[in-house]
Image (spheres, rainbow, N blue to C red):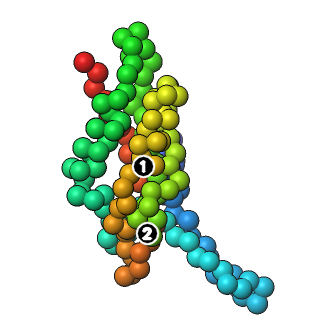
Amino acid sequence: MKTSRNILIAVLVVLFYTNSFAQLKAYPDTTRIKDTIISESFIFPEIFAEFPGGDSKMMKYLTENFTSKVAISKDDITKFRSPAVKWTVDETGKVTDVKIVRSSNFLSVDNLLIDVVTKMPLWKPAEMDNKKVKQVFTIPIQICFK
């Protein structure tokens, strides 16, 4: 019983983290479908999308534009949760589809995070089979209050 429960949890975790794979499958009767656009988003492409200057520059960008601007009263710190944000870097390097996947419990903080991520500079796009592709990112944001 415990093994089946662990397997179910593992399957749910895999489904949660792979929900960004948006692949259209070929239809058996192609006479009915013309000019189908295939859109794929990858979590693990061959070459990852890259923030200009790399991960350290992205962390600096998030610290300067988000973390340093979050203001929570001492009374509200117990209600605060570390937010998590999800976004897509498209084939041109633009950040799109920004969503909060775990709320901080403060609308102003969540909106600031969406705004900061949406305004990120152009990324170097991901590649798969020598083609530029979309890549989905989901990251938690840890904030330490002093």
- The residue positioned 50% from the left and 56% from the top of the image is 96
On the image, the x and y values in percent for residue 49 come to: 34, 64
Circle 1/circle 2 CB separation < 8 Å: no
Q: Residue furthest right?
A: 32
Picture layout, residue 22 above or below residue 68: below
Residue at the image point whose x is 37% and y is 69% from the top: 126
* Marks 1 and 2, the one that precedes in the sequence: 2
Q: Is residue 107 left or right of residue 55?
A: right
Residue 3 makes an appearance in the image: no
Quadrant for the C terminus, please: top left
| Residue 28 vertical placement versus 21 (above, below) | below
Q: Amino acid at mark 2?
A: Thr
Judge by depth and name the residue closer to the eye, 19 or 136: 136
Residue 88 position in % (x across, y down): 46, 57
Q: Is residue 137 visible?
A: yes
Residue drawn at (45%, 70%) of the image? 91
The amino acid type of the residue labelled 1 equals Lys
- Label 1 vs label 2: CA separation? 15 Å
- Structural crowding at the residue carrying mark 2, measured as other residues with C-alpha within 10 Å and reported as few (<14), some (14–19) or many (≥20): some
Residue farthest along the top direction in this orientation:
75
Q: Position of residue 62 (x, y in %)?
A: 32, 42
Q: Label 2, secondary structure: give it.
A: loop
- Left or right of 122: which side holds 6? right
Q: Which residue is mark 1?
A: 119
Q: Residue furthest bottom?
A: 31
> Mark number for residue 92?
2
